[in-house]
Amino acid sequence: MTTASLDKQPHEVASMFDGVAANYDLTNDVLSLGQARLWRKEVAKAVGARPGQLVLDLAAGTATSSLPFAAAGAYVVPCDFSLGMLREGKKRNPWLPLTAGDATKLPFKDGSFDSVTISFGLRNVQDTDAALRELYRVTKPGGQVVICEFSQPTWAPFRTVYTEYLMRAMPPVARAVSSNPDAYVYLADSIRAWPDQPALAALLQKAGWSKVAWRNLSGGIVALHRGVKH
C-alpha cells in the first residue's frame, strides 16, 4: 500500500520538515494541547527499553523521542530522512548517534535491533508496506515494533469535533507558532487520510508481524500498535 502522499514527493516532504525543525517540538506541544509529551511517555512504556538493548527510533526528528530510551540504559539510534531535523537534534544532543535514513531502505543489517519504534512518522512515508517490511527486517527474532500514530477517535461525536479542529483550528494556530504553517496543513490532511486502527493492524500482519495489537490514547486520536517478530 502507498499512503496518501497528498501530491508531495519524498524530497518535498523532507524539505518541508527541514523548514520546521527549529520549532518543531514546541509547535507539536501547542497543537496537541500538551498531549504530545504524554504520548511520548506511553511510547517509552510500551517499548520498555532495558540496559544493553538496541533500539531504533525511526522518524526521530530532533531526537526528543529517543531520550527516554537512552535514559533507560538502551543504546538508541535516532534515524530520520530530514537532514534539517537531524542537524537540530545534533545541536541539542551531540552524544546521540543520529543517522540519516529512508524508512523504505534502512541502512542497517538484518536483525540488528531488539525494538524498533516510529512515532508520528509512518504516515509521511510514501510506501507504508515497504517501511513495515524494513522495520521487520532490521528487528531481531523475538524483537518488537511499537508504532505511535494519529488514528480515528472511537466516539463518533468526538470524531466530528476532532476533524473540525484539524481542518479549521490547526492552520491558524500553526500560522501563529510555526515558521512554516503550510507544513501543518499538509499534516492535517495526512492525518485525515491515514488508515484507522484495524486497517493499520492488518498492514502490520501483512508485513509479517505477529501478536499484533493496539491501544487507543486520548480517545483514539492516537493509537499505539505493537507487533512481534518470530
Image (spheres, rainbow, N blue to C red):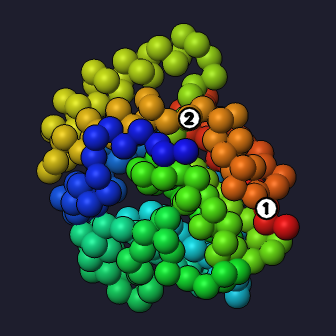
Q: Secondary structure at mark 1?
A: strand
Left or right side of 71 for 194? left
- Which mark identifies residue 195? 2
Q: Of 103 and 224, which appears nearest the observer?
A: 103
Amino acid type assigned to the residue bearing label 1 in the image: Val
Q: Which x, y percent locates residue 65?
A: 48, 64
Task: Decide if residue 177 is in sight here.
Answer: no
Res 113 quadrant in image: bottom right
Residue 82 visible: yes
- Of the pair 150 and 2, the residue shown nearer to us: 2
Position of the N terminus by quadrant: top right
Residue at the spot 48% in from the left edge and 45% down from the top edge: 2
Residue 7 spot, x, y in % from top left: 28, 40
Circle count: 2
The correct choice, above or below, for 29 with respect to 76 in the image is above
Which one is nearer the viewer's eye here, 110 or 147? 110
Q: Is residue 2 above or below residue 170?
A: below
Circle on res. 179: none
Residue at the top extreme, as displayed: 157
Query: Residue at 68% across / 61% down in the picture?
Result: 145
Q: Callout 2: 10 Å neighbours few (<14), some, many (20+)?
A: some
SS for callout 2: loop
Q: Could you say where residue 27 lies in the image, as x and y percent from the top left?
A: 29, 48
Calculate the distance from the C-alpha at mark 2 to the C-alpha at mark 1.
21 Å
Which amino acid type corresponds to the residue marked 2 in the rendered image?
A: Pro
Q: Residues within 10 Å of mark 1 (few under 14, many from 20)?
A: many
Residue 228's label in the rendered image is 1
| Rendered residue at 71%/41% (across/down) | 202
- In the picture, the quarter occupied by the C terminus is bottom right
